[in-house]
Amino acid sequence: MGEWVKIKKTYIKRDEPSVTVTKQSFCFNAAMRKMTELDKNTYVSLFVNEEERKIAFEFKSTNDDIDDYKITSASCECRELMKKNWVSKVSELKKGQNVFAAKKETKSKWVITLCPSFEDQMQRSDSNKLNSASSGIYRYLDNGNIVYIGKGKIRDRLNSPERKNWKFDVIEYSVIMDDEQALQWEAFWIDRYKSSNNNQLPAYNMISGHG
């Protein structure tokens, strides 16, 4: 049985580069603008690693590629990327939760890693369509209210006998095949739920003693 690891909050200081993901664009903070010289580099190429939920930015002073994006008012719009559910879901998070530290991983690329945010959704009545091998974090919703947050093989856990009579109609989940990472993100989201709900756990987490 895996060991519980408490997730510590990540605080991004004002002097550290970061990117805010909104519904319309990626916004670069003052530190990011300074370090990437956005007064000169007014174009950017974007790259994604969907499996690891990473987005890379490569800043340029000239528009030498038709796929480059123009930077305006310290932000850039990328409708193609915003359509991806793992990005759009993050843009819906509360203010402050949609800000991500940027790190220079190569000579030219600045990278942010988005958090898994239960970007996939399914009605409980359609749960037989879930891939039996899919594993990660998930939550159950009853009329829009979160009633359980968990991790593991999503379909197997759903079909557990003790959950047969649980009342919920929607399953939201993120596939994370690494069990240790899933454990950490489960704790992360349970902690966030508690911080927004007077330190209370979701209803079925309290019943099951999990969390």
Image (cartoon, rainbow, N blue to C red):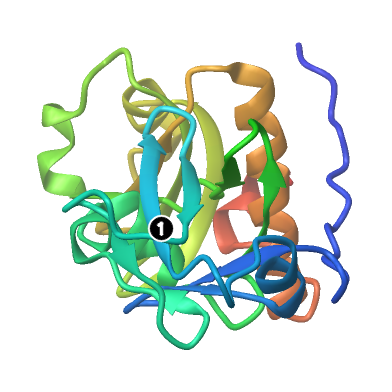
Q: Residue at x 71, y 50 (%)?
A: 188
Residue closer to the observer: 203 or 52: 52
Whether residue 92 is visible here, answered yes or no, is no
Residue 8: image location, x then y, percent: 88, 51
Q: Residue at x 51, y 65 (%)?
A: 41
Residue 183 is left or right of residue 57, and the answer is right
Residue closer to the observer: 80 or 97: 80
Look at the picture and state if 57 lies above or below 109.
Answer: below
Residue 141: image location, x then y, percent: 37, 62
Q: Which residue is mark 1?
A: 44
State which quadrant residue 158 falls in. Answer: top left
Residue 35 is left or right of residue 181, and the answer is right
Look at the picture and state if 26 lies above or below 152.
Answer: below
State which quadrant residue 113 falls in. Answer: top right
Whether residue 106 is visible here, answered yes or no, is yes
Circle 1: residue type: Val
Q: Residue at x 77, y 16 (%)?
A: 2
Q: Secondary structure at mark 1?
A: strand
State which quadrant residue 161 falls in. Answer: top left
Rendered-image quadrant of the N terminus: top right
Q: Residue at x 77, y 71 (%)?
A: 31
Look at the picture and state if 4 lies above or below 125.
Answer: above
Residue 208: image location, x then y, percent: 64, 43
Residue 139 is left or right of residue 11, and the answer is left
Residue 139 is left or right of residue 1, and the answer is left
Residue closer to the observer: 137 or 31: 31
| Dot 1 alpha-carbon crowd within 10 angstroms: few under 14, some 14 to 19, many 20 or more | many
Residue 20: image location, x then y, percent: 56, 71
Residue closer to the observer: 81 or 44: 44
